[in-house]
Image (cartoon, grey):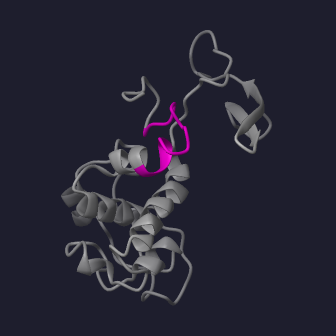
Amino acid sequence: RRCRQPSLSVAVGLGGELLGTWSVGRARPFAEKGQAPGPQTRYRVASITKPQVAIAVMSLVEDGRVQLGDAIGQHVPDAPRPEASIAQLLSHTSGLVAEPCGPWWERAGAGEWQELVESTPGDVADPGLVHHYSNLGYAVLGRLLEVVYERPWNEVLEEVVWQPLGMQQTAISPGPVSYT
């Protein structure tokens, strides 16, 4: 409560074995009767998608399908900052702003790629000059996954990250999971 977090669920594992789970707070803090969180409580993935997208992008690098030095425009021609490298997008040094204009796309239910491209404001710097946290940069990397795998980025994460790690309750938003 003191840190304004409605709830927290933690799982600790070692060597493939679950050592324990702990939860505090209320999973639905604005509901009339707050529900206690537990091991099955699903939260929005939000910024946790960044390391997951990075893992999927690095698997493309490992497979030789893209190179870290590739300009993103080689693979996603209509990307904002097409001259920025994949490595710069991964490290938040692409020069892209933190968010596109309008409602914060991640909390507003995202939208179509073209809408995101059209709502992108000016850049903060040339690629490689400064570190500037960018949700937009990771949206571009998500688009890279879609282009290379020819399916939605969350389906790529499901195949490349979630299923291999046994993350059976993980999805892009709270609610029932569609896979087993």
Q: Position of residue 66 (x, y in %)?
A: 35, 76
The residue shown at (38%, 79%) is 123
The image quadrant where one finds the C terminus is: top left
Q: Report the side of 23 relative to 102 (left or right).
A: right
The residue shown at (26%, 64%) is 148
Q: How many labels does the image show?
A: 0
Residue 99 visible to an observer of this rendering: yes
Q: Is residue 28 magenta?
A: no
Q: Position of residue 145 (x, y in %)?
A: 33, 60
Q: Report the side of 2 relative to 113 (left or right).
A: right
Furthest-top residue in this view: 33
**Residue 108 drawn above or below residue 41:** below
In the foreground, 159 or 119: 159
Q: Does the magenta stretch include residue 162?
A: yes
In the foreground, 12 or 72: 12
In the foreground, 107 or 67: 67
Range of residues picked out in magenta: 160-172
Residue 98 visible to an observer of this rendering: no
**Residue 131 drawn above or below residue 54:** below
The image quadrant where one finds the N terminus is: top right
Q: Where is residue 62 in the image (x, y as percent from the top left)?
A: 45, 72
The residue shown at (62%, 9%) is 33
